[in-house]
């Protein structure tokens, strides 16, 4: 099972304040543990929303809203993608993360092709597999 682990933004991350060297070092050690355990698939921090945009869909209309965004309780500062045997295993890993008080980390299971059952026809499944293979190889279509 794959899980996305979401790290919430806070006033500091939204202000562009970078993590302290101590926190970066602790996070590096934690990520190293995840790699050694074969859990870590991807991990990245995100820039403040002032450097981002939202695209709002309304029928055929698209509206672009430039950041920053004010709903800080809904913002993401970073993420991991983990391969775990269960949600319980992902929870145990999150409990070991080097965060202080006041942080609530969200864990969400990622859909796998089998989760879609018959709705994912053999043709769609094959198409998705080809896309994933191309993406993993870093191929771009001109």
Image (cartoon, helix red, strand yellow):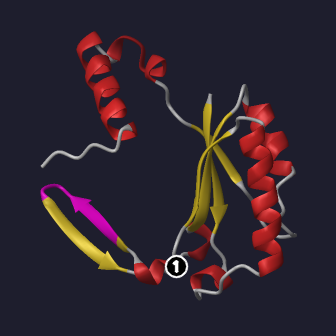
Picture residue at 66% right of the left edge, 77% below the top = 10
Q: In this view, does 114 lie to the left or right of 39?
A: left
In this rendering, the answer to whether 29 lies above or below 40 is: below
Q: Which of 76 and 83 is in front in this view?
A: 83
Q: How many numbered markers are drawn? A: 1
Q: Is residue 90 above or below residue 44?
A: above
Residue 68 seen from this side: no
Residue 135 spot, x, y in % from top left: 34, 40
Which secondary structure type mostly characterizes the magenta part of the structure? strand
Q: Position of residue 16 (x, y in %)?
A: 58, 86
- Between 69 and 98, the one nearer to me in the picture: 98
Q: What residue is shown with label 1?
A: 48
- How far across and how far down the image is residue 44, in percent? 57, 60
As helix, strand or loop, the secondary structure at mark 1 comes to loop
Q: Residue at x 87, y 69 (%)?
A: 101
Please provide the residue range marked out in magenta: 54-60
Q: In which quarter of the image is residue 24?
A: bottom right
């Amino acid at each position: 099972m794959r899980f996305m682990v979401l790290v919430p933004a806070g006033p500091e991350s939204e202000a562009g304040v970078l993590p302290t060297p101590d926190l970066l070092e602790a996070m590096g050690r934690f990520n190293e543990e995840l790699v050694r355990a074969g859990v870590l698939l991807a991990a990245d921090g995100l820039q403040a929303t002032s450097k981002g945009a939202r695209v709002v869909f309304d029928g055929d209309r698209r509206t672009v809203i430039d950041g920053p965004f004010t709903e800080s309780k809904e913002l993401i500062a970073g993420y991991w993608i983990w391969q775990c045997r269960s949600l319980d295993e992902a929870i145990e890993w999150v409990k070991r993360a080097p965060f202080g008080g006041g942080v609530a980390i969200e864990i969400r299971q990622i859909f796998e092709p089998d989760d879609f059952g018959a709705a994912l026809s053999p043709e769609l499944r094959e198409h998705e597999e080809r896309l994933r293979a191309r993406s993993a190889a870093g191929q771009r279509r001109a």
